[in-house]
Amino acid sequence: MICFTGEPDEYLGDDPTIPFGVGRIVAGKLDENFVSNLYEWDKRDYESQWLSSLEQILNGDEKAVLLTWYVNPRESSNLEWWALYRGETGIVHVQNHLPFYDNLDPQFTVEHASISLRDRITVNEDGNTLSEWDVPIKEIELFVEQLKQKGVDSK
């Protein structure tokens, strides 16, 4: 489950006019709050992207991303997303990534961000195990239905 909490927007940055939406992601044992920059995207944009990516996973794609921080590459150095990797046994593996634009394909577009997601690794180049959480695909199916009932449209 990924959603905005309904808490009032926060103003965290140097510019007091840019709001940040407070969100929460729950996936298996993962239960974490996050903030999403609302400079270019509003909450509905994020929700639509989440629904689209979750539908990709349900439709058989091996990987997708849930963007939680988007500002265009002219004004930011990076994004934040939760990477989804479809496992073989009805499980989806979830990892948090902070990809930098200069490490992404030059043809990167936010509309097709999942294409730029690297293949799943569980150990980094230093030999450290990456944090990862598992969620049954059945839970994703139920959550997608909830999003649709809420009136969220996919991007």
Image: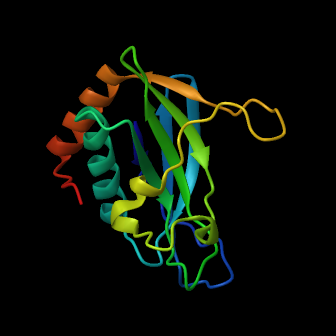
Residue 84 located left or right of residue 15: left
Residue shown at 40%/55% (left/top)? 115
Residue 63 located left or right of residue 141: right
Residue 48 located left or right of residue 108: left
Residue shown at 40%/18% (left/top)? 88
Residue 10 falls in which quadrant of the image? bottom right
Residue 91 located left or right of residue 71: left
Residue 69 position (above or below residue 118): below
- Quadrant location, the N terminus: top left
Question: Could you tell me residue 150's position as x and y percent?
Answer: 19, 46
Its colouring scheme is rainbow
Residue shown at 52%/34% (left/top)? 94
In the picture as drawn, the residue positioned furthest to the top comes out as 89
In the picture as drawn, the residue positioned furthest to the right comes out as 126
Residue 79 falls in which quadrant of the image? bottom right
Residue shown at 49%/51% (left/top)? 117
Q: 95 or 21, which lies in front? A: 95
Q: 124 or 111, which lies in front? A: 124
Q: Is residue 7 visible?
A: no
Residue 15 falls in which quadrant of the image? bottom right
Q: Is residue 93 visible?
A: yes
Question: Could you tell me residue 100's position as x and y percent?
Answer: 63, 65
- Quadrant location, the C terminus: bottom left
Residue 88 position (above or below residue 18): above
Question: Could you tell me residue 96's position as x and y percent?
Answer: 59, 44
Question: Could you tell me residue 76's position as x and y percent?
Answer: 60, 77
Residue 101 position (above or below residue 149): below
How many labels, in total?
0
